[in-house]
Amino acid sequence: MRIAVYDIQEKDIPGAITCIQQAFKDDPYNHWVFDRATFSYKRNAVSLGIRCQWGRHYALFHVAKDIDDPSGNILGVACWLPPKDPQAPRTWNDFAGDWWLWFEQVRMNFWYGRGGLNVKRYYIWKASQATAQSELWKDPNGYYFCNIVTVLPEAQGRGIGRLLFKHVTDVADQEGRKCYLESSRAEPNMAIYGKMGFKLAKEMVCDDDGQAITLYCMMREPEVEM
Ligand SMILES: CC(C)(COP(=O)(O)OP(=O)(O)OC[C@H]1O[C@@H](n2cnc3c(N)ncnc32)[C@H](O)[C@@H]1OP(=O)(O)O)[C@@H](O)C(=O)NCCC(=O)NCCS
């Protein structure tokens, strides 16, 4: 299998959604933020589709494919938010992206309902994330933030995740910038991300009246070649 990493195209979006849904099926954060009894795969697919469309314009959204597979099956997905000075004011482009996302999500909620999303927990997570990032993000050069990384379950452990990371960490190294992620699993993900140079920076607890999950904030310093 020869794997290459590409910028996501419109035609890749259905495969990217399948990849994310399959890889996150048993994810602890997903189980905490969604009620599994009322979880809607359809609504979740629409939500991920909106995220992919947004990511094509406002993020670094990559897919991994087998070069020799003519079907163009998506084996892995990564979405990174580009670096910006955490203290800098938001740009018009940021506002445009946020408004587009907000509008599409409102439209989705109107048509599909919440699809099992626990809204209270979603906002607990958002608040914890904002606190963690304001504590950890001090570098004016900004951070490459790995917002999503998934590999299809049957393709995991074959180096695809490493290639998806390398696509961005090589650039981060050249630019002398840090990378950041929030993992919803300690095992095995912290070991996997450790292999890519990430180190634990903070344990982020999201607590809904005693029903809590921990997310692991990890930071990667730029690697300089000697
Ligand atoms: C996390 C994930 C993206 C990693 O992708 P992957 O393709 O399976 O990882 P790779 O095969 O490229 O492995 C990367 C490194 O981690 C190591 N590794 C892989 N699985 C491991 C495991 N279970 N325990 C310890 N190390 C492991 C590999 O040996 C490799 O190191 P090396 O290149 O130095 O040998 C993928 O497993 C995944 O999608 N998991 C489910 C979804 C998920 O948890 N996403 C992240 C949410 S925060």
Image: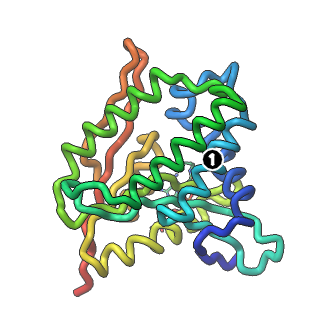
Residue furthest top in the image: 209
For residue 165, side relative to residue 52 (left or right): left
Q: Would residue 92 be found to the left or right of residue 72 on screen?
A: left
221 to 87, vertically: above or below: below
Where, by quadrant of the figure, is residue 11 drawn? bottom right
Q: Which residue in the rendered view is the most extreme toward the right?
A: 71
Image quadrant containing the N terminus: bottom right
Instruction: Say which amino acid is labelled 1.
Output: Leu
Residue 24 location, x and y as percent?
60, 42
Name the image colouring.
rainbow
Give SS at disc 1.
Answer: helix
Query: Quadrant of the image for the C terminus?
Result: bottom left
Residue 16 in picture, x, y percent from top left: 67, 57
- Report the residue at 55% width, 33% height from top: 30
- x and y percent of residue 180 in the render? 33, 56
- Residue at x 54% of width, y 22% of height: 118
Residue drawn at (55%, 56%) of the image: 54
The image position of residue 97, as x and y in percent, is 47, 54
Residue drawn where x is 33% and y is 29% of the image? 205
Q: Is residue 176 above or below residue 214?
A: below
Nearest the viewer among 55 and 25 is: 55
Pointer 1 residue? 48
Q: How crowded is the residue under tag 1: few (<14 C-alpha within 10 Å), some, or many (20+)?
A: some
From what the image shows, is residue 17 above or below residue 59?
above
